[in-house]
Image (tube, helix red, strand yellow):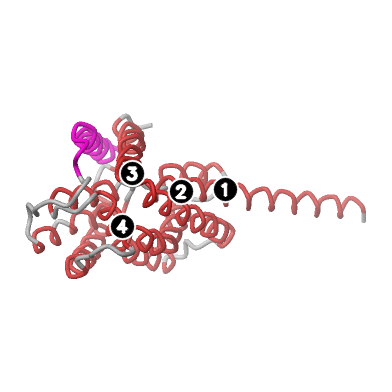
Amino acid sequence: MLPADGVERSCLREGLMRFFTILSVAFLASLLSSMSGAGSAMLTTPVWLALGFPLPVAIASNQLNGAAWTPLAARNYLKGRPVDWALLRIMVVCGLAGAWVGTLIVRGIDAALLQRVIGSIILLLVAVVACNPALGRSEGEPLLSRGVTGLLAFPLGVYESFFGSGNGLFTSMLLAKGRGQTLVASLGCYYAIAFFWNCFAVAVYSAAGFADARLMLPSTIGSVFGAYLGSRLGRQKGHDWVRGLFVLLGGVLGLKLALGW
């Protein structure tokens, strides 16, 4: 009886340790991601794999986490700000179309090469932001029409469907440069759009049987609390804070992808 009790207690301790490890990692990842747009998957995915979860399960969990916390982050960033809802609707639809196409074409692409290319592009975006401190500080004149900006969400959706990390950087830059929005408002708009893209991905992965409550439950709880706190900090601190994290975490992500780490 005692040995059995000992095994049971040991299993319980291991389960609790894993639960709180997952919750803590998800909290930190969404805290940083919600303030920068760099994407929480660059931190969470390696940890989930190290804990023994298969890659599709890890991705499905990341997408569910995003679907849970992006509405909170969007609300915190956009509350009291004017929002071009017509543009966001176009971007949601075009992005979903891109995500669907991405699921069809991703199998024929060299993922390692593509990640290096994406990493180089992210580093270029980071350099642009770093060299232009005033970019996105205040609203400016739109350089692109609403329709063109909306259509550019199509390739973002393609990217979202199979990788996604850094998509907040791309979308924020598109809205800040193309539509003259502030960087803070652009980040909030991305989170509003990403909610629908995440929900699409969750449906696809869940239908394929890649849902695992042992990972999804604690990671969703942690990510919601982290993103709520992070987005409130991002809004309160303002442009310089968000821009600094954009450059720092975007640079880390870009180097990670470009060098194949």
Residue 50 sits above or below residue 56 on the image = above
Query: Mark 1 or 4 closer to N-term?
Result: 1
Residue 12 sits above or below residue 146 on the image = above
Measure the C-alpha gap from mark 2 to mark 4.
14 Å
Q: Amino acid at mark 3?
A: Val
Disc 1 vs disc 3: which is toward the camera? 3
Mark 1, other Cα within 10 Å: few <14 / some 14–19 / many ≥20: some
Identify the residue under disc 4: 188
Query: Mark 1 or 3 closer to N-term?
Result: 1
Measure the C-alpha gap from mark 1 to mark 3.
22 Å
Q: Quadrant of residue 203?
A: bottom left
Identify the residue under disc 3: 242
Comparing 112 with 18, the one in front is 18
Query: Mark 4 or 3 closer to N-term?
Result: 4
Identify the residue under disc 2: 31
Disc 1 vs disc 2: which is toward the camera? 2
Measure the C-alpha gap from mark 1 to mark 2.
10 Å
Q: Amino acid at mark 1?
A: Ser
Q: In x, y percent, where is residue 57?
A: 48, 56
